[in-house]
Image (cartoon, helix red, strand yellow):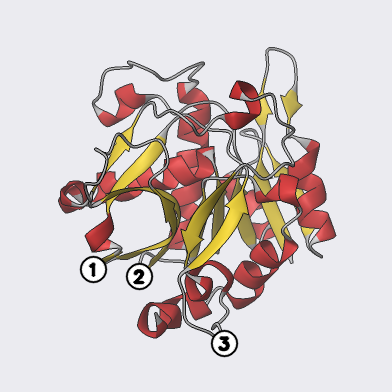
Amino acid sequence: MKIGITASSSKTQYFVNQAYVQYVADAGFTPIIITPEIPDNVVFEMIEGLLLPGGIDLDPIYYGEDNTSSFGVDPEKDAFERKLFHIARERGIPIFGICRGFQLIAREYMRADNKMFEFMYFCEHIGEHNQVDNQQLSRNIHQHFVEYVPQTLYSIKPDKPGPFHTPVNSMHHQCLITDFKQKNVLGARQFKMAAWTQRGLKIAKNKMSTEAVCEAFCITNWGSPILAVQWHPEELRDFSLLQNFFTKGGAYTNNLKMS
């Protein structure tokens, strides 16, 4: 299976972090690096899946918001990845988002349906989630735990009851905040939180909050199987996450009924 990975650019070079390319290859797939000059019809003759990698912040101006905390934005890169995302989605090609890719998919999902703002909003800055920089930790070191749904995240039905927790590595300061009571948002499109945490949220001691930082989600009934994670599985070498999605992507629709 050939997996396309979008490239970033500098003034004189295109580049992709080696970890993404190695991650796809070591998971048993063929990585294809995509640049804006490749015609869309050629891109989608070459690839059978799309990986939107991490990178710089998305430009909030495009989404009608002031830029208060978004760093090093590149509107041309945003437009390039948005275009590929929607073409892949409309063609039914499985899409996997990591960090920035997670955020782009979330932004486009909310933009497509304004009703989603009743259940979620995008936060330009949240603390305690960029531990690589703040604590000078290596990118491949686990840093905090998230609660997750095995059926949705790994397409695996657990043999014991939850809750389930797994350690992840964080390298972001922007995030998707969701209403915890609305983990499953049903409608024409279906959104399901696959992992979440309340880390970084300002919650009064001894008081419950219905808000959570969404760490992973899947979307069905929007043209193609979509899974996105806020952490960096390519640095953790979590091959089963990638393998299960691209080989069992169709199972995500059934998982909405299982959990």
Single out the residue that lies furthest toward the front: 206
* Mark sitting earlier along the chain (3/1): 3
Q: CA separation, marks 1 and 2?
A: 7 Å
Please state the horizontal and vertical placement of residue 223, each as a whole percent of the image: 41, 66
* Mark sitting earlier along the chain (1/2): 1
Q: Are marks 3 and 1 in contact (CB under 8 Å)?
A: no
Callout 3: SS: loop
Please state the horizontal and vertical placement of residue 55, each as a whole percent of the image: 59, 31
Number of the front mark, 2 or 3: 3
Q: Residues within 10 Å of mark 1 (few under 14, many from 20)?
A: few
Q: Are marks 1 and 2 in contact (CB under 8 Å)?
A: yes
**Image: 240 above or below 45:** below
Give, as a three-letter code, the residue at label 1. Answer: Ala
In the picture, measured across the screen, residue 202 lies left or right of residue 1, that is left
Determine which quarter of the picture holds residue 122: top left
Query: 78 or 115: which is nearer to us?
Result: 115
Residue drawn at x 69%, y 24% is 136
Single out the residue that lies furthest toward the bottom: 159
- The numbered disc on residue 221 is 2
Q: CA separation, marks 3 and 1?
A: 31 Å
Give, as a three-letter code, the residue at label 3. Answer: Asp
Q: Quadrant where the C terminus lies?
A: bottom left
* Residue that label 3 marks: 159
* Residue that label 1 marks: 188
Query: 209 or 188: which is nearer to us?
Result: 209
Please state the horizontal and vertical placement of residue 20, each as a whole percent of the image: 73, 45
Callout 2: SS: loop
